[in-house]
């Protein structure tokens, strides 16, 4: 699939919107809490349901993507996500807010098991294609920081959900109009075998799931907590929420380009050789950030987010290389249901942990999680090949 086609463009925009919507609340939580007379730490757990559904919903989403077709599921994704965001904007209290966020999480769950397999099917350089798609997703994270900050400041927190919601609905209409219909659903296409020994395949999926869980915990802790981390560590230096949003957006934007470099490396070298140093580098950066303030913390945040974002393409690259296209959405959905489902715990405990122990403890916990991810990645077969065609994954030499 050409990266310049309307389909690829809308799929990349979809990834950006998916991450943007999930992080609007984390950026706007202080304004919402102030309106309702609450502390932001006490309001934060109300978004946990959205992340639970974001994970668990990946399982049926992936299955339906293979059985119904990916195009129709993406139309549902765009329109459903936008409509749910508009409902969030109408919330009148914590529980109606939580219910609307849960619905938003359910529609957001569609993208990863459906959109990513759709964009890599037939790609000549799947690693780089995943890298570009990952960059788009992370630019959505940056957009959540800057767009939400300005909308909250100028129009209030409800507009921070309403404006992107209308944009998503418009993208859904464009997707339905411009993207060609699929002739056959993926599950009904001819089977292409993936010739890997069973024990190696089991090992790969075991490691992939464990690494995805610990990596997703780190991702959720950082992306949901960085805004409040900067606000706390920049007190007396920068206090304007919009300016902090710009600073955070700059971190996310610069760090996002790591995925392009990683995507190129995935197409050329064995996954383990690239993956291992990226996750290992996170450990000392989180330890140093735990004790940093002001601009020193900002520099370290840029560094650790570069490696957090740089680790994102690997799990999808493993699925592309070793799972046949006709069942990629289902396998991806199973992996995401486990990893995102467990990592939703990060959103639930973020507020209470920070309130009870502070960001120093949280950053040290993330250093430990990075250590676990490094341990899991070290268990990968050492010679897993650099790439295979996205449409017909081939066997790669492995070392046991």
Image (cartoon, rainbow, N blue to C red):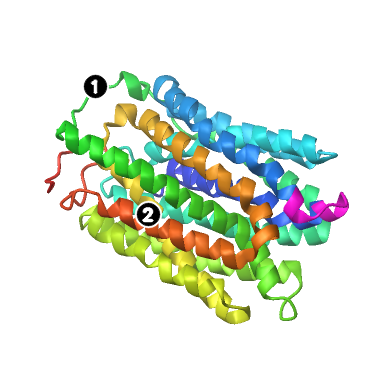
Callout 1: SS? loop
Relative placement, left or right, of 12 versus 379 is right
Q: Is residue 174 visible?
A: no
Q: Which residue sits at x=68%, y=53%? A: 352
- Label 2 packing within 10 angstroms: few (<14), some (14-19), many (20+): many
- CA gap between label 2 and label 1 equals 36 Å
Up/down of 384 relative to 237, above or below: above
Residue 76 x %, y %:
57, 29
Relative placement, left or right, of 4 versus 165 is left
Q: Nearer the viewer, mark 2 or mark 1?
A: 2
Q: Which residue sits at x=15%, y=51%? A: 383
Residue 214 x %, y %:
43, 50
Up/down of 319 relative to 28, above or below: above
Q: Where is mark 1, residue-wise?
A: 190
Q: Which residue sits at x=73%, y=67%? A: 242
Relative placement, left or right, of 134 versus 325 is right
Residue 158 x %, y %:
79, 47
Q: Which residue sits at x=37%, y=48%? A: 211
- Label 1 packing within 10 angstroms: few (<14), some (14-19), many (20+): few
Please report whichever mark, 2 or 1, sits nearer to the chain's N-terminal start. Answer: 1
Q: Which residues are magenta?
A: 33-42
Q: Where is mark 2, residue-wise?
A: 373
Callout 2: SS? helix
Residue 118 sits inside the magenta stretch: no
Q: Report the residue that reaches farthest toward the front.
A: 356
Residue 337 x %, y %:
47, 34
**What is the quadrant of residue 28 in the picture?**
bottom right
């Amino acid at each position: 699939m050409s990266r310049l086609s309307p389909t690829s463009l809308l799929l990349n925009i979809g990834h950006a919107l998916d991450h943007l919507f999930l992080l609007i609340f984390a950026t706007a939580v202080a304004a919402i809490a102030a309106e309702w007379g609450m502390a932001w730490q006490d309001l934060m757990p109300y978004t946990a349901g959205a992340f639970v559904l974001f994970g668990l919903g990946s399982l049926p989403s992936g299955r339906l993507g293979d059985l119904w077709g990916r195009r129709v599921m993406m139309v549902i994704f765009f329109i459903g996500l936008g409509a749910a965001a508009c409902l969030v904007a109408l919330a009148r209290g914590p529980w109606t807010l939580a219910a609307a966020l849960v619905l938003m999480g359910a529609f957001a769950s569609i993208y990863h098991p459906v959109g990513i397999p759709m964009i890599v099917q037939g790609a000549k350089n799947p690693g780089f294609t995943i890298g570009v798609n990952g960059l788009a997703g992370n630019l959505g994270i940056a957009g959540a920081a800057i767009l939400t900050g300005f909308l909250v400041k100028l129009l209030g927190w409800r507009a921070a959900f309403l404006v992107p919601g209308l944009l998503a609905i418009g993208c859904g209409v464009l997707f339905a109009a411009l993207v060609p219909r699929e002739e056959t659903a993926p599950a009904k296409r001819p089977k292409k075998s993936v010739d890997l020994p069973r024990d190696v395949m089991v090992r790969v999926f075991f490691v992939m799931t464990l690494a995805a869980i610990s990596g997703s915990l780190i991702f959720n802790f950082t992306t949901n907590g960085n805004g409040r981390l900067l606000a706390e560590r920049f007190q007396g230096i920068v206090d304007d929420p919009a300016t902090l949003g710009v600073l955070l957006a700059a971190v996310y934007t610069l760090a996002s380009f790591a995925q392009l470099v990683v995507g190129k490396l995935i197409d050329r070298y064995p996954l383990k050789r690239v993956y291992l140093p990226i996750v290992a580098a996170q450990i000392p950066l989180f330890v140093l950030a735990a004790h940093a303030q002001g601009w020193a913390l900002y520099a370290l945040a840029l560094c650790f987010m570069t490696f957090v974002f740089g680790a994102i393409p690997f799990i999808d690259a493993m699925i592309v290389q070793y799972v046949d296209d006709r069942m990629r959405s289902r396998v991806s959905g199973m992996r995401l249901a486990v990893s995102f489902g467990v990592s939703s715990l990060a959103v639930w405990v973020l507020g209470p942990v920070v309130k009870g122990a502070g960001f120093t403890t949280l950053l040290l916990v993330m250093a430990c999680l990075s250590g676990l991810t490094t341990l899991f990645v070290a268990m990968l077969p050492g010679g897993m090949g650099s790439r295979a065609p996205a449409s017909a994954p081939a066997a790669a030499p492995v070392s046991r």
